[in-house]
Image: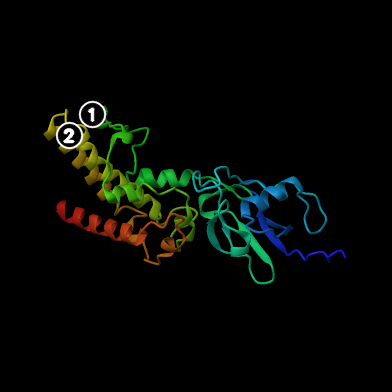
């Protein structure tokens, strides 16, 4: 006797589309068969092969990106059910809403290029603002250059180096905006990681005159700590801690932000 066909659940993916940075956004809906352990990225791959909406209309494929399938490139970050997630690791069954619907949107605060594809340039700019690394206009001195692979970071430095710069913390924070506002937790992670690397590289460059090296390192750290209180700095953090909830590598961002506040206050007293 032939067994009856198994019922296969479906998910209605409602995807926010945008044809260009200046275009008005709109939504397309796609019906996706819910297979075991199907990720959002795999569902988008399936739609790309047959971009047919629930209205029976064939549309242009959704613009999105992913490649590493394991939080390596973090290019696949998007918003699913109002929460920033990595599409390559997030299962549909974990985020689908009651009624079998799931809304997918881009990280809007980073600037939409097209559909789910965003411009991550903001994250770099915010790191530069807080001294997370040198700008092209102000290159690091060759005197201070050290092969990063040769450094043995402190436990704090090793922890902070796990930051993937995915932008989830910026998207989730109620104090950040598409333009201006609070820079977001990732910039403070980069700033404190630069502090840790400066401290460790002093011993790695022992052949350089100690007093000169120490002065240069201290100046860079001082400038970074001054930047913490500039526009968009730590004083604009509202302590909502939504960044803590969405970080894909579970960094202690509450401690990072608390340390940034202490460093900013301490630096302000030093300049008096």
**Secondary element at tag 1:** helix
> Is mark 1 in CB contact (under 8 Å) with mark 2?
yes
Image spot of residue 228 (x, y percent):
30, 52
Q: Which mark is residue 218?
A: none
The answer to whether 4 is drawn above or below residue 186 in the figure is below
Q: For this rendering, which residue is in front, 73 or 7?
A: 7
Label 1 vs 2, first from the N-terminus: 1
**Secondary element at tag 2:** helix
Q: Is residue 146 visible?
A: yes
The answer to whether 137 is drawn above or below residue 99 in the figure is above
Judging by the rendered image, the residue that carries numbered circle 2 is 213
Q: Outermost residue toward the right?
A: 1
Judging by the rendered image, the residue that carries numbered circle 1 is 143
Mark 1: few/some/many CA within 10 Å (<14, 14-19, 20+): few
Q: For this rendering, which residue is in front, 141 or 65?
A: 65
Question: Taking 162 as reference, is 203 left or right?
Answer: left
Question: In which quadrant of the rendered image does the C terminus lie?
Answer: bottom left
State which quadrant residue 184 falls in: bottom left
């Amino acid at each position: 006797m032939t067994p009856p066909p198994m019922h296969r659940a479906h998910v209605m993916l409602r995807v926010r589309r945008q044809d260009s940075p200046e275009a008005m956004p709109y939504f397309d809906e796609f019906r996706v068969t819910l297979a075991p352990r199907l990720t959002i990225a795999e569902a988008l791959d399936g739609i790309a092969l047959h971009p047919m909406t629930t209205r029976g209309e064939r549309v242009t494929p959704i613009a999105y990106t992913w490649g590493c399938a394991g939080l390596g490139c973090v290019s696949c970050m998007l918003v699913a059910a109002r929460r920033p997630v990595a599409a390559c690791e997030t299962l549909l069954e974990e985020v689908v809403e009651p009624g079998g619907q799931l809304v997918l949107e881009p990280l809007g605060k980073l600037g939409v290029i097209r559909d789910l594809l965003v411009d991550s340039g903001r994250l770099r700019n915010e790191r530069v603002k807080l001294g997370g690394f040198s700008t092209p206009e102000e290159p690091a001195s060759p005197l201070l250059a050290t092969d990063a692979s040769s450094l043995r970071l402190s436990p704090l430095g090793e922890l902070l180096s796990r930051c993937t710069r995915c932008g989830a913390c910026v998207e989730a924070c109620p104090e950040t905006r598409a333009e201006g506002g609070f820079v977001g937790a990732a910039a403070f992670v980069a700033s404190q990681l630069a502090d840790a690397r400066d401290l460790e590289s002093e011993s790695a460059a022992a052949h350089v005159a100690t007093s000169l090296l120490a002065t240069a390192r201290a100046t860079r750290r001082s400038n970074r700590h001054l930047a913490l209180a500039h526009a968009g700095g730590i004083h604009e953090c509202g302590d909502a801690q939504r960044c803590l909830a969405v970080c894909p590598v579970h960094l202690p961002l509450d401690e990072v932000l608390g340390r940034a506040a202490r460093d900013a206050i301490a630096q302000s007293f030093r300049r008096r």
